Image (cartoon, rainbow, N blue to C red):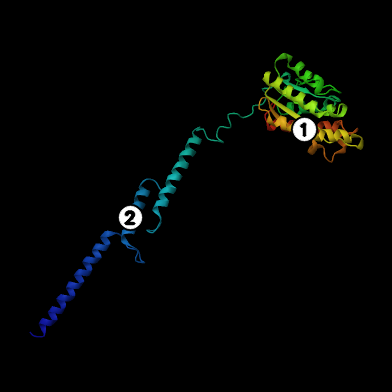
Amino acid sequence: MRSTRPYVATKLSVLGLLSIGIWACGEVNDGGTSSAGGGAPDETTSSSAETTATVGTGGAATTGAGGATAGSTSSSSSSSASTAEASSSASGGETVGTGGDPAECVKGQTKGNQVAVIGESFIAATHGITQQIEKQAKASGSLPQSDRYIDNSVSGTTLANDQIPSQYRKAAENGMIKYVLMDGGGNDCLLRGDGDAALAAAESLFETMEKDNVEKVVYFFYPDPIGNNFSSLKSCLDTLRPKMKALCDGLTSPKCYWLDLRPTWNGHNEYTQDGIHPTSAGSIATGDAVWEVMKENCVAQ
């Protein structure tokens, strides 16, 4: 009996320790799944609960207990918002790219008598520039095949002395002019050497156009003259060009679009025979350049 009691006591002590261990393990398991690396149970429990909530609301389930659930929830919200926008677009919602720009340029609404072409011999020598613009407009459906613009350009005329401005007024007598294609200032420099007078006349002309509700103007300015005999002309044009451009760029009514023809003409001596007026090839190149500006800015489309 003496040997049995210590043995039994020892057994009871071991059983007691095992019971405490089992109870402790039970507490841990009830509190959450512990990570293999010994992560904090409280954090794991929170992450698990949040992950369950995210999945329950349609979010993307987080892989693993250590994932950043807050980030998943935010991503799910963003994804849901994107899905809502996509659904709105598909159902005719006002989203860019689904219904087109409301102010999109519509072709075929302009009549020939709504477009005035004014200027001097750069245009009027052959009227080839106007003809090329009309050709492009008809090919694109912007001008009826049998229609023409009002081309009142006259060789030898200037902006000063009310010559080119009078061309506009004559075209505007019908009260229909919405668009003006023009040059001007070349003869003011060539014949008078007075670019400032041309600038003042242009300012007055644009004021008249504003009163007449003209919408848009394309002002195409000369290429560099070719030949030593035009050095004074070139000097005058070089002085006038930035001033006239600033005037055009500053207009809002009518809106004015400036076209510098130097890049179009540079390196193409075949575009002129006398150094200043366009040949057939020069007229076509100039007309095409003007038409590109018209297309880009919805002028007479």
Identify the disc placed on residue 152: none
Residue at screen point 87% across, 29% down: 190
Residue 17 at x, y percent in the picture: 19, 73
Q: Tell me which amino acid carries mark 1.
A: Asp
Q: Residue furthest bottom?
A: 2
Identify the disc placed on residue 46: 2
Q: Quadrant of the C terminus?
A: top right
Looking at the image, tell me whether mark 1 or mark 2 is earlier in sequence order: 2
Residue at screen point 17% across, 73% down: 15
Residue 48 at x, y percent in the picture: 34, 55
Q: Tell me which amino acid carries mark 2.
A: Ser
Q: Is mark 2 on a helix, strand or loop?
A: helix
Residue 14 at x, y percent in the picture: 18, 75
The foreground one among 42 and 64 is 42
| On screen, residue 75 above or below 7 | above
Q: What element carries label 1?
A: helix
Using the numbered discs, state the Cα–Cα distance from disc 1 to disc 2 in whole angstroms.
70 Å
Would residue 256 appear left or right of 102 to someone viewing this image? right
Residue 230 at x, y percent in the picture: 89, 34
The foreground one among 84 and 236 is 236
Question: In this view of the protein, can residue 243 be seen by the observer?
Answer: yes
Would residue 65 appear left or right of 17 to someone viewing this image? right
| On screen, residue 295 above or below 118 | below
Residue at screen point 76% across, 34% down: 242
Binning the other alpha carbons within 10 Å of mark 2 as few (below 14), some (14 to 19) or many (20 upward) gives some
Would residue 107 appear left or right of 282 to someone viewing this image? left
Q: Would you name the residue on which mark 1 appears?
A: 288
The foreground one among 147 and 179 is 179
Give the quarter of the image for residue 42: bottom left
The foreground one among 285 and 195 is 195
